[in-house]
Image (cartoon, rainbow, N blue to C red):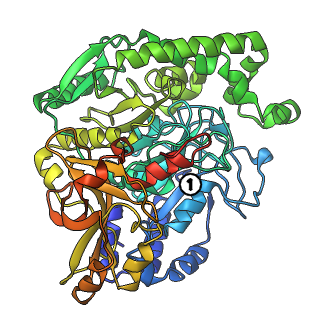
Amino acid sequence: MTDATLTLGSLRERYAAGVSPVEVVDEVYARIAARGDDHVWITLLPQETLRAAAAALDPADRDRLPLWGVPYALKDNLDVAGLPTTAACPAFAYEPQASAEVVERLAAAGALLVGKTNLDQFATGLNGTRSPYGVPVSVGDPELISGGSSSGSAVAVAAGLVPFSIGTDTAGSGRVPAALNGIVGLKPSVGLVSGRGMLPACRSLDCASVFAHDVADAAAVLAVIAGPDPDDAWSRTLPVPDAVPTPAPPAGLRLAVPARIDRWGSRGEQAAWEQTLGRIAAAGVDLVPVPMEAFFEAGDQLYSGAWLAERLDGLEGFVATSGDAVWPAVRDVLAGAAAVRGVDTFAALDRMQELRRRTHRLLDGVDALLAPTVTETFTVAEMQADPVALNSRLGRFTTFTNLLDLCAIALPGLPGRVPFGVTVQAPAGRDAELAGIAATLEAILAGRDVAAARAAPSAPLPGELPGEGFDLAVVGAHLEGMPLHGDLLSRGARLVARTTTAPSYRFYALRGTTPPKPGLRRVREGGAAIEVEVYRLPIAEVGGFLATVVAPLGIGQVTLADGGVVHGFICEPWALEDAEDITATRGWRPYLARIAAPGARPS
């Protein structure tokens, strides 16, 4: 067994070197055994079951499936067919007939589910101590809480048991435990990832989240699980971010920061925040103080206002008949829902809409909001002695996020005496931009050269091909799953990377093409990064392929995000005169999803 941290990149390298998924599965179970009873897992699949699943992976798919052979953990409020869903309440447990859509997408991408993880019961809590299955603790200090409610999912990654895990986030459950364990927690826009098969906490606010060791791994997983789900009533058609985030240049980056923070913990959190801000500012980022009162007012509604009634929805019958099975602190929280009247709910919705407008205006003119993820932490004993008040203090900078329709990424700050984290947040739909900002901050805080990170080659998918070939960037009908993709495969083309162009292109939906095709045009200014897939054609097949390319499209040179130049589809200018400019979609798939949405009218 190796002591190296498991990441997507390290697994790709090991698989390319001949390591088998079965060997990786054995290593994961050895790591779990070495940790002992750490209260991370509620249901762990038998090792032989996962070995069989690993052995069944087809090596020919390693180049095609982005998470081929990657083990992961899943929070136990998400369904897996054949496994119990407990939500950390044994009396509530049920065995679903179908898996959550997130689980299905991960399986289709080649990922291997190791087991289901512990949580604050019914995902109600931010501390990780509200479970009859035990208390996971911070990997940095066994006296301290792990954070919750996605406690087991976060610790599974932070302890090096799996490369990534899936949690959920309603009030900060995907970010607080990331901060308290020194890892990344990605909370997408609500509706970007399907919630079908997730036991609701507050259905209108819930979303699946991703824990990983770095922003790149979290973004790669999000690219797999994101996208509309027609069978999920709360799904939204939002831009699906690239699998590889493009770091933003620090110079010119403007981040809002809290104008005042009234409460700090006693374990060096304030010093860590100030040092983190100093490092970021020294890199050239402009920090803009903003008042936080409207954000906090919104966040206060989650546990003390009308949204308590939504939290009780679906659990009311169980709580009424089996209240003794509910964790005392959770039962106390849910008890407040009985006082919520219908008129209170509509008044709260109206006020929340006002707060959304006000806070989004505060973020006009900046790229994102940067704040501490938490400003203090507590020992397990302290939390158990005062579970409600201390829990609310953990969520000061996280409970408002979903209520105000923001996406967020939590990442480690400069550590103090305890792990310390910061979170960047932006309005929903800007997940790709936010990942780029988070990648920049990650590089700054880790002491890496941001310029070098921006120039680094885009992360290839598993099995990048060595040797000679004709590298071709495709942006439309030749993408995987599109009508002309088979023409590439029939000629022996192999996927090299999923990435974007340099941010210097405009993108258009052409008129009168069959099948529908886009056009790409390079510009001096006002451009954007457009999603591409790069394929390597055998040299012997290049001539035959070029013969299939007809006007107004042609093959020219395309500059990628890493500065490299490959051949790719370009478009004659005359065909763009009556084409629809779809640059804002950043790719052909998001554009097709947009026009397929109910009520949309294609141009």
Residue 182 sits in quarter: top left
Above or below, 363 against 515 in this view is above
Above or below, 165 against 303 in this view is below
Q: Image quadrant for the N terminus?
A: bottom left
Q: Which residue is mark 1?
A: 74
Picture residue at 69% right of the left edge, 14% below the top: 346
In the rendered view, does 150 fall on the left or right side of 570? Answer: right
Crowding near the residue tagged with mark 1, few <14, some 14–19, many ≥20 C-alpha atoms within 10 Å: many
Front residue of 186 and 177: 186
**Amino acid type for the residue under numbered disc 1:** Leu
Residue 449 visible in image: no
State the SS at label 1: strand
Front residue of 87 and 572: 572
Above or below, 245 against 287 in this view is below
Residue 305 visible in image: yes
Name the residue furthest bottom: 540
In the rendered view, does 205 fall on the left or right side of 411? Answer: right
In the rendered view, does 150 fall on the left or right side of 533? Answer: right
